[in-house]
Image (tube, rainbow, N blue to C red):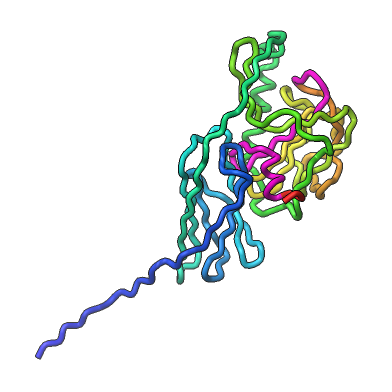
Amino acid sequence: MVFALVAFSLVQAPVPIQISARARSLRPGEVVVLSIVPPLATETLRVRAFDKDIAAYKDGDTWRAIVGVDLDVTPGTYRVSVETGNAENVGRGTHELHIAPRTFRTRRLTVNQAFVTPPASELPRIERESALLAATWESSAPSRLWTSAFVRPVPQAANSAFGTRSIFNGKPRNSHGGADFLSRAGTPIQAPNAGRIAVARSLYFSGNTVIIDHGLGLFSTLAHLSRIDVEEGELVTPAQRVGLVGATGRVTGAHLHWAVRAGDARVDPLSLLAVLGQTR
């Protein structure tokens, strides 16, 4: 009698991962906080959304990831995928984000042409500063630097809507990628949260500007300051004063412009406050 020896390969099926999402709303320009619970302990987690890798961090037994829905994202259904790095028990999970349409208001203004088109003599400076900003967005700390809830940088309410489409002298301009606060000149500006000062200098368009790297691709930009009270490379604490409200750069009056980036997504700062701020 002949016995055949058959080798069996035992392949363990991926263990499912629990994924939930929290957001003020699921529209362009919003911040989404993913809560991820792997079935087994893991020290690494890969998250992808909008065809990009998203940094994740541990929060007790739960992992979290901050996903920005850029203001120019086309409405539709987008899949978030998560995979653990545990080689013995690979975990995988998916979650769908249903992004609803959002209509941003349009404003048409007639202004001095010099305000719309920079003089040729300033173009080299503008190019250098554009390269500086591009490098800044690529150099975020690989770990979470913020330590508590996000706070408003000034007490006044926002008076200019995020995402507004401006048309100056009949020509479309870039969308408004932040929120403007009608604060009086000299009003102290506090850091929305802890982080490292990535930029603290005068820029052509935004005037005296402070950019705070909160880590994991999350940045706050505070623009048009009359005075800067921090230095590049400095670590700041939540609510630390970083400068004073002013009217520097290409603006018509004193106010604070606060912009937030999550990864490479431009998101509404008020959305960040809604999901990770003191008001939540």
**Does residue 79 show up magenta in the picture?**
no
Q: Position of residue 262 (x, y in %)?
A: 62, 43
Q: Nearer the viewer, residue 250 or 157?
A: 157
Q: Nearer the viewer, residue 164 or 203?
A: 164
- Residue 208, quarter of the rendered image: top right
**Total marks drawn?**
0
Q: What residue is rendered at 72% in x and 36% in y?
A: 221
Q: Position of residue 239 (x, y in %)?
A: 83, 46
Q: Position of residue 170 (x, y in %)?
A: 60, 11
For this orientation, the residue located farthest to the bottom is: 1
In the image, is 86 to the left or to the right of 24? Answer: left
For this orientation, the residue located farthest to the left is: 1
Q: Nearer the viewer, residue 50 or 45?
A: 50
- Residue 68, quarter of the rendered image: top right
Q: What residue is rendered at 52% in x and 62% in y?
A: 18
Q: What residue is rendered at 77% in x and 22% in y?
A: 249
Report the span colored magenta.
250-276
